[in-house]
Amino acid sequence: MTTEEKKVRDFGLVFYFWFLLVLAAYAFGVFSIVQLADANQGLVQWITEKFGDATAILGDYIWWAVGIAGVLFLIGIIFAYLQVWLMSYIGAEIVNTVIFGIPVVLTGAGIYAFIAFEEVWIGIVLIAPAAFLLIIAILVGKRVVLGSKIFEMSNEAVNEEKETLLPVLFFSFMSIITIVTGVSSAAYAGANIDKYITSNWLEYLVFFILIYVYLVIHWTMLYFADAINICIFKRWNNYKESSIKYAMKDVWKIKGSIVMFGMFMAFFDAIIKTIQFFANRKFYKNWKNNKVWSTTMKVLKIIFFIFIFILKGLFKILKFLNYYTLTIIVVEKQGFIRSMMRSADLSLDSAADIIVGKTGVNIAKGLFTIMTFGVFSAGGFFLGYYWLAGWIGITAGSYAGLSYTIWFSLAVAAAFFFFGYLPTTAILRPISTAYKTILFFYIADPFRGHPGRRTRITGDIQESLDKIKDDVMETYDKEERPTWNKPEEAKV
């Protein structure tokens, strides 16, 4: 057993406690669903009586609906990969155009406002942020160009390693189960907790633990999916054969550290959500008692939202500082505490590169959303209007000035968009993971690699890296980092 393996296995037992926690949480969630259904038979009966005809229609066509949903999902995956393929060729140009183009457009709009309107403040409102963004773009322009090319390379990696979608889709499916069971557990606990607990502080503690448990499940499953993809992209980068099977074996060695990291992030997320839950509960309890009380509560509500906004901002900073934590856990196989410390240092050093990566993913998300909305929603509406409505028998009647046919077609368009959009959002996660992995290898920790490592870095990226190498290295000279070398037989 090597020293590295011993470090990793020290946390292994935590994984099994987490797995038992998952089983217990899902079991309690199912129990809560059954109990809530039994306690609300009147509501169930009312829904059945009110929408009995609609339920019968759905029952007649349920398998058609399932089949269409499956086909849409497959088409959505293909469509999303076509977009990734396109971004692997022109992703850098799109990112650069948006980042440098926004200040230019705002500047042009500001100049036009000075000419077209008498109010000078309109032009100032447009010119001021444009000048600020333009100065930043110029100062970090070389880093932006480099980051955009690495983003394009990340799309290439996802396009070649299509199996990276599977861990994310599995996580998405498990997230639905976690959300349903978690909400049901919270609803059941909220309806029955007064029978057993009279102290407000104990009630707060119980709800915090309940929310924390389901958030631990969510964050840990997310990190396991990302860790598998990091292993795949790591081997892809080194020209080695990669597969989910190999990646899962590699991730199994660091399962305890991943769970610990998930528990750490879930703790702060749970604090925010618990405060939101109880604050809303208190605010709305006596909202309409009288005008003075109502006005006071509105003021407190504003203060509450400001407080939550600050907490969420701090949480975003925490996530930013941990940008490389999971990558370091997977690549260097260190414990999560040491990985967090190194990640904080590297994240501060490479802040510009991280921002470029997040900007690129957000641009891609916007483009994907627009294209998916146009193709799937328009196709769904016309299909529902000209074929499905008549086939099912929805031909007469109206509601709120619109015919049932139009309402039905809008519903079909929404369903088409939903099932087309899901694969698109799922694919964005591997793109972000690939960018993070590649950025770590070439920019975030340049002293870590060994000279003879094979890479997929392209000529234009190397050229951009050489141009800004001195500038980049100056930001990484805060401390002396030893070169990370593994034994020859253990190199990957």
Image (cartoon, rainbow, N blue to C red):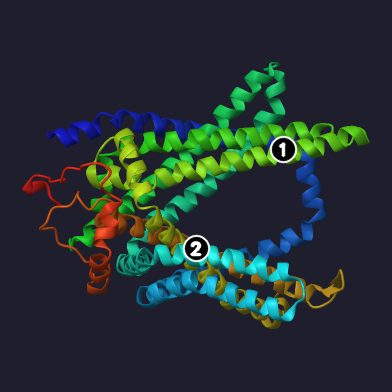
Crowding at dot 1, Cα within 10 Å, few <14 / some 14-19 / many 20+, comes out as few
Say which label, 2 or 1, has the lower sequence index.
Answer: 1
User: Real-space Cα distance between discs 2 and 1?
Assistant: 30 Å
Which is closer to the viewer, label 2 or label 1?
1
Q: Is residue 180 left or right of residue 167?
A: right
Pick out the residue farthest to the right. 290
For the point 25% across and 38% down, the residue is 334
Please tell me whether residue 227 is drawn above or below residue 402 in the rendered image.
above
Q: Is residue 16 left or right of residue 362?
A: left
For the point 60% across and 24% down, the residue is 206
In the image, which disc is placed on residue 192?
none
Q: Where residue 294 sits: x, y (%)?
A: 87, 36
Q: Where residue 2 sits: x, y (%)?
A: 12, 35
Which residue is identified by label 2? 362
Residue 78 visible here: no
Q: Where residue 29 sits: x, y (%)?
A: 57, 36
Residue 443 visible here: yes
Please name whichever residue, 186 or 357, is drawn nearer the observer in this view of the structure. 357
Please tell me whether residue 184 is drawn above or below residue 102 in the rendered image.
above
Please name whichever residue, 374 or 350, is drawn nearer the observer in this view of the structure. 350
Amino acid at dot 1: Ile
Amino acid at dot 2: Asn
Which residue is identified by label 1? 303
Please name whichever residue, 352 or 374, is drawn nearer the observer in this view of the structure. 352
Number of callouts: 2
For the point 89% across and 36% down, the residue is 288
Pick out the residue farthest to the bottom. 386
For the point 74% across and 41% down, the residue is 302
